[in-house]
Amino acid sequence: MGYYDKKFRESAMSILRQGKSKKEVTAMFGLGVNTLRTWEKLEAETGTLSNRPLNREQPKIKDSELLEYYRENPHSTNKEAALAFNCSASGIRDAKKRVKITRKKTQYSTVSGTKKSERSS
């Protein structure tokens, strides 16, 4: 719905109101029938063909709290942080990306990270 501007929508809907069928209007403007239905519904609900305002919630994890947590717990995993913030590990990953905290790399264990020739028997 956000692809077409208000003026375009209004012109398509005015032709529809003049008595043309939805099929004719869709052929004229290169639209789908469902698009016209959506615009009709939008106009009936809001009285205009403008885009609805976006309803985005604030992030659950505040940036300042996340930074403070990782200052105090620098070696914490995403799962541990998720428990502390009562959210998912993917939520922590996204929040860390937002505040530019890099991903903690996995370290090799002593045995598996050592070449066979260097291991003591």
Image (cartoon, rainbow, N blue to C red):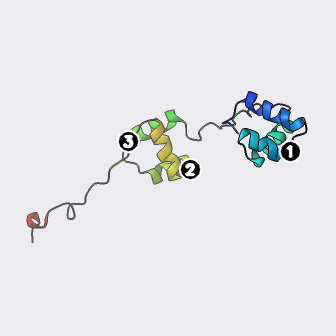
Please, which residue is most extreme toward the bottom here? Answer: 121
Q: CA distance from mark 1 to mark 2?
A: 50 Å
Disc 2 designates what residue? 87
Of residue 83 and residue 15, the one placed in the foreground of this image is 15
Disc 1 designates what residue? 21
Q: Give left or right: position of 60 versus 104.
A: right
In this rendering, the answer to whether 18 lies above or below 31 is: above
Of residue 79 and residue 44, the one placed in the foreground of this image is 44
Disc 3 + disc 1, Cβ < 8 Å: no
* Element at label 3: loop
Disc 3 designates what residue? 102
Rendering coords of residue 106 (x, y %): 31, 54
Q: Quadrant of residue 58?
A: top right
Please name the amino acid that badge 2 sits on: Cys
Q: Quadrant of residue 54?
A: top right
In this rendering, the answer to whether 78 lies above or below 49 is: below
Q: Residue at x 80, y 41 (%)?
A: 25
Q: Earlier in the sequence, mark 1 or mark 2?
A: 1
Rendering coords of residue 29 (x, y %): 73, 38
Q: CA distance from mark 3 to mark 2?
A: 19 Å
